[in-house]
Image (spheres, helix red, strand yellow):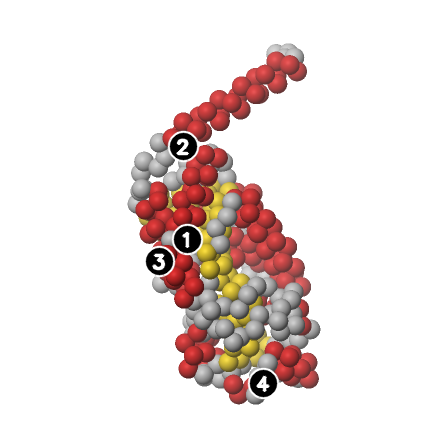
Amino acid sequence: MYMTRRRFVAISAGTALASALHGNAFAAGYPNRPVRVYLPVAAGTGLDVDARVTMEYFAEQLGQAVVIENRPQAGGNLAMIEASKSVPDGYTLIAAGIGPAVANAYLYKNPGYDAQRDLAPISLMQVLPSVLVIHPSLGVNSLAELITMAKQKPGDITYGSQGAGSFVHLAVEQFMMATGTNFTHVPYAKQNPFSDLAGGHVKLMISGVAPVISFIKSGLVKALVVSAKERIAIMPDVPTASEAGIPGFEAYAWNGLFAPRGTPQPILARLNTDIGKAVESPPVKERMERFGGYPAPGTPEDFTKFLDTERAKWSKVIAQAKVQLD
């Protein structure tokens, strides 16, 4: 049927208005049942524990129970697929970090989802700076000394990680790119790379603070630098990467909240407000700071910009290091 442009525009505007009104009406009663949150990590891991504490206070803000489902299979890809295919009504969310939300798009040829296309960013929740730690047997006391040694003996220094494509692996790859050094990767499967570092079986790691802070305090490993904008309170004597002379090195873990793409805007706004209050609540904030992290809530637009920066950074690292998981 022939339709004039004026009539088409009027109908389109009317449809958009009706959709907006429907979204507002739907959001007015939201939430009226429990909200499910997928976690693409195993139960009991660091990000799982952090997210569970946050979700407890998130549930208080929502006024509804939050049901957590761990789906660590396939590097978190399964959870991301499930979340992206869920009904976009605000009752299924996912809390994800650097791997599932950013790096997996470049590590896997076909992860089964496109985080940028399929998921709506709600808010960044926390940022966890990393720390470069070495075994004392290396005999160096500063980052400059480590870089000098590494360039004199390329490949001699070993570093451990939980496996290819893990945050620890990619962080060291980024460090090598930033400093022109070359270390030898020792990927672990079931063994604990942190304990092996403390025992001197590998000599270096770049890790979140939580897994290594006890080893640092006991003197089993030595912290040389933190990747953070400012020194962190639990290690005030450890310089930042910028202070140590490598301002381009920024490797930190983080966790953010997403909804399926198409979730009504009023619901996204409500979720953004509530998760922001949750991560700024004193118990959640204190837990983050205890392990060197900090709450980082913001608008969905802020989170989108952050994700764009992370994608640009890690896609380059993964491509140059030629890391492929399938």
Q: Earlier in the sequence, mark 2 or mark 3?
A: 2
Circle 2 or circle 1, nearest the eye: 1
At mark 1, the secondary structure is: helix
Task: Name the residue carrying label 1.
Answer: 280
Q: CA distance from mark 2 to mark 3?
A: 29 Å
Rendered residue at 66%/75% (across/down): 181
Q: In this rendering, is residue 100 above or below 191?
A: above
Number of other residues with Cα within 10 Å of mark 2, as a class: few under 14, some 14 to 19, many 20 or more: many
| Amino acid beneath label 3 | Pro
| Amino acid beneath label 4 | Val
Circle 4 or circle 3, nearest the eye: 3
Q: CA distance from mark 4 to mark 3?
A: 38 Å
Rendered residue at 40%/44% (across/down): 274
Q: Earlier in the sequence, mark 4 or mark 3?
A: 4
Q: CA distance from mark 4 to mark 1?
A: 39 Å
Quarter of the image for the C terminus: give it. Answer: bottom right
Q: Earlier in the sequence, mark 4 or mark 1?
A: 4
